[in-house]
Image: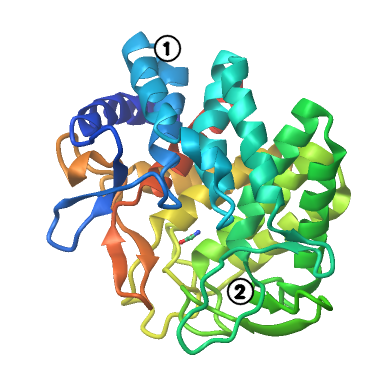
Amino acid sequence: MEALIDRVFTVAEQQYTAMDTRLTEKTLPRTLSADGEFVPSNIYWWCSGFYPGSLWYIYEYTRKDAVKTLAEKNTLKLDSIQYVTRDHDVGFQLNCSYGNAFRLTGNEAYKQVLYQGAKSLSTRFNPAAGVIRSWDFVRKGCDWKFPVIIDNMMNLELLLSMSKAYADDSLQNIACTHANTTIQHHFRDDYSTYHLVDYDPETGAVRGKQTVQGFSDDSSWSRGQAWGLYGYTMCYRYTHDQKYLDMAEKIYNFIFNNPNLPEDLVPYWDFDAPNIPNEPRDASAAACTASALYELDGYRPGNHYKEIADKIMESLGSPAYRAEVGTNGNFILMHSVGSIPHGQEIDVPLNYADYYFLEALMRKRDLEK
Ligand code: GLY
């Protein structure tokens, strides 16, 4: 594993340094198109924080000033995200970029941006429903009033970390209320998760449960399961509330006892996709799952979480998923899925697969120290 970590970070440094030359002052890497063209995003795309976040992990591993300079430059592109209140993604965007920047440099200026971002995110909380609203748009054919997706569990890290940094209990109260309401309404009896729950913002009543990016309303979209596992493990880090660890364990049991999980532990894009085994895999779900499992292993050792995560890392680090230097639009991993129902980003590299892969490798390194 040590050799794998070293090999991946050597490749990552080369790929991500070269990738910067594809960008402008206002763009960040997103994916490749179906015909292999590099696709950038603007700063408002939900994934804009992952490239700078990955650069910070590469800097943490290599300690090279040139990488730090790139990480700083690409982090600062996101400065205005701190004021965004129109969707929940500010957590993903700032926590991965500015969050790692602050963690590694201790620079107070980064912390202030994070705090403002947390305050912006908290404006989306509705006390009657006990959740943070995910999206303001309403999908065609739906009548959502207050849609919340499982992905939102990931955004709580920004609230929890800033609550701790500024002794601001209101942020932790919002995050925990959201996590608790999600336990109540987002999970099925087998602890698989729905993608979206719509709430009545006046009464808090659940109006509907459905999918947007999964195969069907009753199916288990793979990345959603990974967001849940990671989200509850992370909530335990800040609160030490056992019920979050219990949730993580139950989600783990659903994923790893699922007969449709392939032998290499990289899931199909949905556990109930109709043409398994002839369905695309989602490396992003596998990477996020592995990163969560390394953290979970630290809290509940002796449950094979680390060994399972190692196996995922070996799969993702193999030529089946990891691209050669100079290929793959300079992304590290191949074979992720954005959204099959939208016909978008199918079997392509995605910057968040790379981010959670690098994060998992750093966690593995630290766990073994
Ligand atoms: N948060 C959007 C996604 O997981 O695709």
Q: Quadrant of residue 132?
A: bottom right
Against 45, residue 237 (above or below) is: above
Q: Which mark is residue 196?
A: 2
SS at mark 1 in the image: loop
Quadrant location, the N terminus: top left
Would residue 37 be found to the left or right of residue 140 on screen? left
The residue positioned 79% from the left and 43% from the top of the image is 171
Q: Quadrant of the C terminus?
A: top right
Q: Can residue 226 be seen here?
A: yes
Q: Is residue 141 above or below residue 162?
A: below
Q: Quadrant of residue 219?
A: bottom right
Q: How many marks?
A: 2
Callout 2 amino acid: Leu
Left/right placement of residue 179 relative to residue 352 reads right
Indicate how the structure is coloured in the image: rainbow
| Residue 93 in the image, given as x and y percentages of width and height | 50, 43
Which of pointers 2 and 1 lies earlier in the amino acid sequence? Answer: 1
User: Residue at label 1?
Assistant: 63
Secondary-structure class at tag 2: strand
The reply, left or right, for residue 45 in relation to residue 194 is: left
Q: CA distance from mark 2 to mark 1?
A: 41 Å
Label 1 CB-ligand 1 distance < 8 A? no
Residue visible at 87% across and 46% down in the picture: 241
Please name the amino acid that badge 1 sits on. Arg
As drawn, 175 above or below 225:
above
Answer left or right for 224 relative to 18: right
Q: Position of residue 187 (x, y in %)?
A: 72, 73
Find the residue positioned furthest to the bottom.
Answer: 141
Q: Residue at x 54, y 74 (%)?
A: 259
- Residue 256 visible, this angle: no
